[in-house]
Image: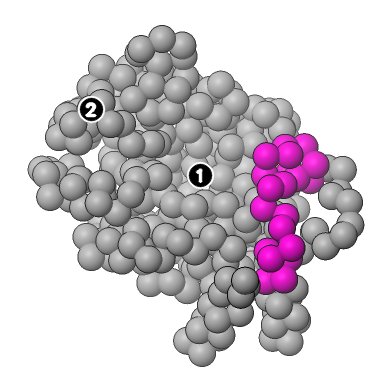
Amino acid sequence: MRYTTVGRSGLKVSAIGLGCNNFGMRIDQDGADKVVGAALDAGVTHFDTADMYGGGRSEVLLGKALGARRDEVVVATKFGARVADGPYGRGASRRHIVRSCDASLKRLGTDRIDLYYQHYADPDTPIEETLTALDDLVQAGKVLYAGTSNLAAWQLADAAHVAGRTRFVGAQIEWSLLKRTVERDMVPAARHFGVGVIPYFPLASGLLSGKYRRGEEFPADSRFAALPFFAQGATDDNFVIVERLTAYAEGQGLTLLELALSWLAAQPEVASVLVGATRPEQAAANAAAIVDLTPAQVAEVAELAAAVPA
């Protein structure tokens, strides 16, 4: 396993991180224990959750699964998504951040959050208020580093310009070989401001895992079968790209999964690639998937993943 610092910070994380959005929804405590155990055994030190996942259950399950090994890892969680009805159930105001942090600490069973993300932009709250509230949590020792998720490039730039002692060191974005629009502005912005990029959905919800074939039914235990929303990505154009990449991967002695994760890990801005798992063997396979690609291979894969001409 490789370990990389997050942007211009001293926070070190594993090149593959475990996304825990399945915890409390698709798997229970026993399943989480096995997945987390397999990830730990494979050298994963980066575990990502959020207060909204499973209605808070993801944090509970992750905290219990880590148990006595909590100090061996980086625990990341998020605030800002809607977690309750009414005007105070979401956002990035000081009021919501402080309350959310205390609630997450309790669910996780820990005394600090290593990396605390603003989950979504909040148009009702000035970014100065959000960053000042996060700084107060850092000074109190409840949070060690702050990050952001799903912001536009201009919002990341705005935050960088007004930040004081505490700034965003990491940014989660949806990025995969099938979803590359972030390369136009968000990735260059992160590079410019020294913010580490943490891609999520790197396998396009499984389309780049090799488990789906054009014209075939989705496997019964797959995300596409269980959550039809994600199946919208199973378009003919995307399957054309998947087939191109599969053929290339086989020619290089790699699996499609290895190619997809390794290509992201090869990007200089990327600190860690978040991959979910519902079974321990998936967690182990994801952790072992990173191989070193040459600059020529990185360029060739990018060309193969270009949009299909109309």
Q: Name the residue nearer the viewer: 14 or 228.
A: 228
Q: Residue at horizontal 68%, vertical 64%?
A: 238
Residue 105 painted magenta: no
Q: Amino acid at mark 2?
A: Thr
- Residue 78, x across and y down, in percent: 41, 34
Magenta residues span 222-241
Q: Amino acid at mark 1?
A: Phe
Frontmost of labels 2 and 1 is 2
In this picture, is 174 found above or below 51? below
Residue for badge 1: 47
Q: Residue at horizontal 57%, vertical 66%?
A: 177
Q: Name the residue nearer the viewer: 208 or 185.
A: 185
Identity of the residue furthest to the bottom in this view = 296
Q: Residue at horizontal 30%, vertical 24%?
A: 97
In this picture, is 170 found above or below 126? below
- Residue 271, x across and y down, in percent: 41, 61
Q: Is residue 130 left or right of residue 280?
A: left
